[in-house]
Image: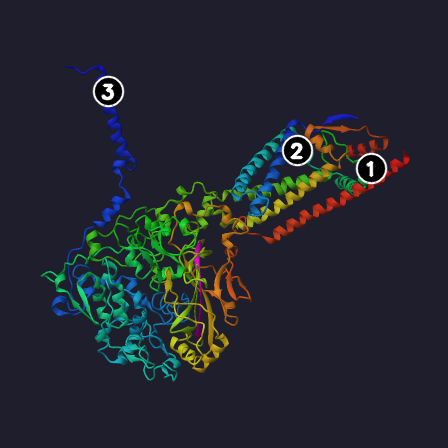
Amino acid sequence: MGMTKTNRVWRVVRNTVAVAALLFMERFPERCILATESPQSKAQQNLTEVTHRPVPLLDANGRNVIASGQPVSAERTCGACHDTQYISDHCYHADLGIRRWFRPGQSEHAAHAWDYTSGGVGGWKPFFYQRLSPPGESKPDLGLADWLRTYGFRYVGGRLGQFGFGKEPLTKRGESSQEQAAAASDTAADGTQVEKSASETTASAMPGSHSGLTWDPDLMSTLSGNQPVRWDWRSSGTLEMNCFVCHLHSPDNTARVEEIKAGRFAWAVTATLARTGAVIRKGTQWEYNKQAFDERGAVVAQSFRIERPTAEQCGQCHEKVVGPHEQLSCLEISWSDWSTITKGQVFSAQRISDSELNIAGKKNLIRPWDIHAASLLDCRHCHFSLDNPALFEPPARGRPKHLRFEPRRLSFAEYLERPSHQFAKGDTAQGKIAPEFTGTMRTCRDCHDATEAHEWLPFRAVHLARLECETCHIPAVYAPALEAIDWSAPADGQPFLQWRGVTWSSSTTVPVITGFRPVILPRRAMDGEITLGPYNLVRASYWVEAGASPRPVRLRDLEAILSRLPRNPESKSGESSPVFSTSYRRRLPSRYSTTELATQLKNVGVTSPEHVVEIWPFGIHHGVAPARLAIRQCETCHSSRSLLGQAFSLGNVQDDDNSRGARIVPGSGIPEAYRLEISWSSDNPALILTPNPEKAGFYILGKSRHNWVDWLGFFAFLGVVLTIGVHTSFRVFPSLSLLKSFRRQD
Amino acid sequence: MQKELIYTLYERFWHWFQAVMILTLLFTGFSVHYSGSAGVIPFATAVRLHNVVGWLLVINAFLGFFYYLTTGTLRQLIPEPRELHILAWRQLRYYLYGMFHGEPHPLQRSRQRRLNPLQQITYLAILNILLPVQVVTGVALWFMQYSPELMHFVGGIGNLAAVHMLGAWFFGAFVLAHIYLATTGPTPWAHFVTMITGYEVIEEPSAGEATSVQQNEIA
């Protein structure tokens, strides 16, 4: 039976539509539902990532730990497949800048005269007050072992923890004579011999100083007493790079830190595995759980999962990270939460309103802590390995302008064997380590086309050229952050802290987290452009022993004088509450005057003690709000009450300290022409910074004024008004007199 | 008494349109500069309005220039150098003394001679200095939205804004003086009426006044 005419027409129409649909799907796959992938399916895909094969755990000699009972060596264990030597040598997390240390005071780029690297261990920050004293220093503060025990909780291990300032492994250097070792470590990274001043080579009689021998931080320790003693590296082991702390699904960082603090460096890697069930703590010892291993000595425990680092792993040292299955019921902040304590950043996909924190106006904060966390992004997506073939981009510097794509990159096999652990990093006010990698990270504009998303924005090009994205997209921070850190008179080895974004009420023990609006400051980026971005500012106060080799006064010297003074009755230890806790002190009024402390410091041999007050800027880049909450009102910036001129508290100060001479720490990129304007209130002495972007060449319509223009124009206008007034009066009064004369004539 | 057409319809339209534009620019500019203060309009509205009206003013200025050039009216703006100082002094004396004592205006306005010497000097300065400065700085500020690099060549927005703002103050002072001087006609409203209707009532000069007017015409 032949097809009817209607059927033929229908078939032609149907086929045409089908072909058109196929062509459309091929041309625009992103518009076709079938071709797209839901975020949920992506999340599921992540959960089912290919897992690492079972790993035999090896000790430092390459023997299986089940047989030897020795500590796990990540270098040997992971080194079976990956070039761990290469990884350790190409990782600024591992060397912390020590590879290129210089004599203190020899670099014009250093923020302080006592800095000896660009960051990490030798670029001193008042937040980690005690210094790893470089070789040859008189009155040393900490030796390498001391530094690791004090601040190793944020150090992954590696080059610094295994070699120190020298080029030989620390365990081998311990075998040679101390004098040879000291001589070896007196050679700076560039091969130049570090000169020793007379004061450095002469034995000092001050408390805590050593006598007779030149200070070698690699081999000596000061923590155990006033006199430096040799540290036995063969007994403690060295702190090798700990792959598991970042690559294990659930590393036990607490156990790792305990081992480091106890000086059992070799066991730090083993302790990291505590949650996997492969190792069991027995007192201060560790034993291997044979049940968790197969017959080849490989760990088969389900919880031993090797994976790409997630935000949780990075968060162990960098920031408070709250995973999807955690409930944020208490914001416990410690120095491990570096970006939280300095900037109030919390990296979490959870809604702020869902947390159990006592945040003011919480019910209206129906937004994630960080929009990128909510978008399933991890730290590694922006701070990727610079060799990662999937994410590698050649740096703009030195790249031919015509080169749009660089096809040359490692194969995945090559990358897996030798993955560079130099991670892409930003160009920030606070990140000085590894300056050669500054500006390599993926920025907002590498992923987002701002011109497409801001069609509504008037004068778009000017705004995008002069503002960092974060200025509008991080309108507020909803966790407490440091306002001031004061080492002038520490108690129990801890500084006094002042917090912003949280208020303590005397009537209740539960503080209210108010959050804070970042201060908007201009900063000169590496490309020379000055842009406005959000910052938290932290005032740091501390004592410096001035002279030929200035350096911060040692904590033990401060404690020596404070022990002779009556204890400050108002200080109390720690701040703890159901919603916000920190083991560090909140600032309470000290009754020690700066003058009194200076006198006491002189009495214990500190030459020319100077009280220094610095302002440390911390650029805020995380905690991005959804676009709907970004600043959109023009008047927020373009008015006399502009956010760009918003006064920013730098905390309460004492009348006689050096706060009037406070300066922004050098090298932060805040333009030198940008001077601080500090208000001083005598009733409640406090430092207030009033931003003045005009000093950095900004002119913000509606906010900025040329006063002379306004006054000149006003007087010109006033002159006209007065002239009119005088002229009018002459016109009116003679007319009246004429009118009278006319009336008389009538 | 007779009525004479002083301003054509286009000239009146041009004047009032320009007046509205200038007043709007002054108000919106004030709203931008003093954003957030009482009595001003929102910043975004003020900026948009300022830009649109600014361009309208520029277009109207060019159309006016074309009209005045082709009709020859432009010549009225150019003062006669001969005896300018004498005529200017007479006008100044009238404003400062004569008008208080009932003296006649030294210039009898006509369609061919609308501006007194002081007006000619003032308008020449405004049209050759103040208006171009305002237009150039205003267009430069507007153009930066497309090319922020321009900022580097002019030393930042601040320099442009300073010149533009000073010009705005002077424009405001001029507008005020202009409105006031418009009240110095035979009656306070006479010049306003003329600028609306186009016609001015011209009185027959007395013998003495006729001499004065003749002298002006000779000049």
Asked if the residue under mark 2 is in contact with the one under mark 3, i.e. CB atoms within 8 Å, the reply is: no
User: x%, y% of residue A278?
Assistant: 17, 63
Residue A1 position by quadrant: top left
Mark 3 neighbour density, 10 Å: few (under 14) some (14–19) many (20 or more): few
Q: Residue at x 29, y 38 (%)?
A: A30
From which residue to which does the magenta span run? A533-545
* Callout 1 amino acid: Glu
Q: Nearer the viewer, residue A264 or A423?
A: A264
Q: Is residue A112 magenta?
A: no
Residue B217 position by quadrant: top right
Disc on res. A10: 3
**Residue position marked by numbered label 1 in the rendering:** B103
**Residue position marked by numbered label 2 in the rendering:** B74
Disc 3/disc 1 C-alpha distance (Å): 98 Å
> Which is in the foreground here, disc 3 or disc 1?
3
Above or below A260: residue B163: above
* Callout 3 amino acid: Trp
* Callout 2 amino acid: Leu
Q: Main secondary structure of the magenta part?
A: strand
A76 lies left or right of A538: left
Residue B212 position by quadrant: top right
